[in-house]
Amino acid sequence: MDLESNSFSATESKRLAEIYADRINPSVRSELLTKFILPDIFGRIGRIDSSFFPDLKTSNDALVLDIGCGKGAVGAALRALKILPERAQIYGLDFFPYPSPYKTNYQEVFQGDATDPRCWEQIKNELPGGFNLIISVGMPPPTVAHLLKTKIFFPAIGKNGRVIFALDSNPGKPPKDFEVIGGKYPTDQIIIYYRRN
């Protein structure tokens, strides 16, 4: 990554995506996320139930974006924990085109590079109101560092939207508006949280 130009080369993005590719059985990963990881993340931030989104309890328009969605385990776990309103629409973004049977909890999955501004332009054009929650669990720390530094995802955050990055290692110092919280498990050692007011 060229820190001066704030850009990743296509080769760097592909290499990181291959290293962090979702190779775990989706039902096993979803179970781990449901029983351990997501309760730890949401428990440390606030509440682990639908009251985490008090403004969305009755909304059918709740939009969630799972960055680095892989085979869809985070979406399945969010639904299993009932953190989201029942009719929330979950979207995914991943570098790789995983087979569609894994993505049953997603309205749509965008295939693209999260460090590429064109990817975010496409998402913003398709969903101009922004997301109520942008979440990523286990994305490569250099990719998260780039997203935090450039803030290219900021136009995709909706009114009162929240952002959660859960990582296995420190991506560096986040912007001042972001809170850093320590997690309990290797997958969420670093939780970076933001709420747009």
Image: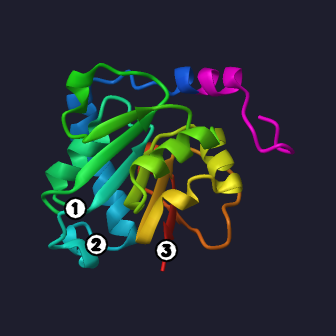
Query: From the viewer's perspective, is 118 left or right of 73?
Result: right
State if disc 1 and disc 2 touch (CB < 8 Å). yes
Query: Is residue 170 something that shows in the picture?
Result: no
First-in-chain label (2 vs 3): 2
Residue 75 spot, x, y in % from top left: 27, 44
Closer to the camera, 134 or 127?
A: 127
Residue 31 spot, x, y in % from top left: 21, 39
Q: Is residue 62 magenta?
A: no
Q: Quadrant of residue 131?
A: bottom left
Residue under circle 1? Answer: 83
Magenta stretch bounds: 1-16
Closer to the camera, 45 or 99?
A: 99
Q: Is residue 79 above or below residue 101?
A: below
At horizontal 72% and vertical 33% (from top left) the residue drawn is: 8
Residue under circle 2? Answer: 52
Residue kind at label 1, given as amino acid type: Ile
Mark 1 falls on what kind of element? loop
First-in-chain label (3 vs 1): 1
Residue 73 spot, x, y in % from top left: 28, 37
Mark 2 falls on what kind of element? helix
Query: From the viewer's perspective, is 168 left or right of 62?
Result: right
Q: Quadrant of residue 141?
A: top right
Q: Is residue 4 magenta?
A: yes
Please identify, in this view, whether the residue under mark 2 or under mark 3 is nearer the observer.
3
First-in-chain label (2 vs 1): 2
Residue under circle 3? Answer: 196
Residue kind at label 3, given as amino acid type: Arg
Q: Is residue 83 above or below residue 186?
A: below
